[in-house]
Image (tube, helix red, strand yellow):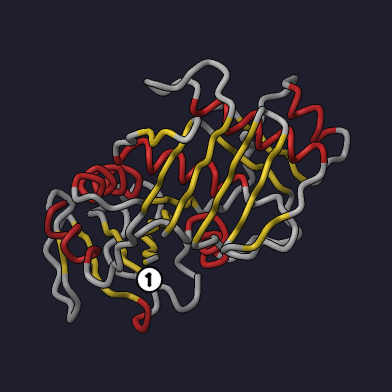
Amino acid sequence: MKLVVFAGRSNTGKTSLIKLLILELKKRGYSLGTIKSCSHEFSLDLKGKDSWHHIEAGADGVALISKSTTAVIKSNEAKPCIKDIAKNYFENMDVVLSEGGRREPSVEKIEILRKGVQMVPETPKDSLSAVIADFDIELSLPVFRPHEINKIANFVEKGIKKRSLNVSLKVNERNITLNKFLQTELANILSASMEPLHGIEGCPEEIDLSVQDASEIYLEINKKRVGLNRFLNEFFSNMLLGMVRTLDGVPERPKKVILSIKY
C-alpha cells in the first residue's frame, strides 16, 4: 500500500484535485482509500439518531453496518497518525491519498499552491516529492499544473505495488461467478468486519467464512480457526447470507455458503 499526503492551505484546491485523481486512478484499476486530516473537530453522527445516543451514553466506539456500507466511530485520546490509520483500515488498498497531513513524518507529500493563497511550499524539503501550482514557479522538484491529472497520476503511480485479489463464493456446493466489482465489495466488507475481533492485527492475507443451515459458522483467518461467541456467530451469519441473497442464482435460503478471500 502506497500512502501519499496532499498538503496545502485552505482554498488551494486539494479536494477538487483529489476527486479527479481518484477517478483517474480507479480507471487504471487501482483500489484506493482516502483520509481527510482535519484541524478542527467534526462529527459523522446526526443528533437524535440511535448511534448518537450510544455515544452520548458513554460508548467509546460505535459501528454502523448495512449491506453495502460499514462505518466505525471511535473516540481518540490523541489525534492518530495518518500512517497508522492507513495501515489499520486500508492496508489491502493499492494506494491511499490523504488530504492534509503536512506534519506527518516519513510520508511522501505533494504540495498544492495557488496564486493569491499560497505561493511558496511550506512542507519540509526532505518529505516533499512534487508541487502542483497554477502559476509559474522554479523548483528542483517536479512541478505540475492542476489540470494535468494524467501526469500527476503517472507520478503517484510510481511505486504502487498492486495487490491481486481472488474471491470465490460457493453456495450449496455450486460456484457462483463474481465480477471484479463484486469481488472487491465482498472483500472490503468482510475485511472491515475483522476489525472488532480481538487478536486480529493488520489486514489478513486469507479469510474463509462458511455458514451452514444459518447456524453453523466457521471463520478462518490465515488458515487459523477463530472462535466466535453467540453474538458474532449471528453477526457473521446475517452479514454473509444478507450479501449473497441478492446475487443472481442464489436461493432465498441457501443451506451452505462459503466465501474465500485471498490477497
Q: At label 1, which amino acid type do we have?
A: Glu
Q: Closest to the observer: 189 or 227? A: 227
Q: Most extreme residue toward the front, as rendered?
A: 173
Q: Most extreme residue toward the top, as rendered?
A: 252
Which x, y percent locates residue 39? Answer: 56, 53
Query: From this viewpoint, is residue 8 visible?
Result: no
Q: Most extreme residue toward the bottom, as rendered?
A: 126
Q: Is residue 231 shown above or below 83? A: above
Q: Closest to the observer: 89 or 247? A: 247
Q: Closest to the observer: 67 or 223? A: 223
Residue found at x 49% / y 28%: 244
> What is the quadrant of residue 49 in the picture?
top right
Residue found at x 45% / y 67%: 102
Q: Is residue 250 shown above or below 120? A: above
Q: Is residue 140 shown above or below 228? A: below
Label 1: state its secondary structure: loop
Q: Closest to the observer: 176 or 138? A: 176
In the picture, measured across the screen, residue 223 lies left or right of residue 169, that is right
Query: From this viewpoint, is residue 35 visible?
Result: yes
Which x, y percent locates residue 141? Answer: 19, 77
Q: What residue does disc 1 label? A: 122
Which x, y percent locates residue 167? Answer: 40, 47
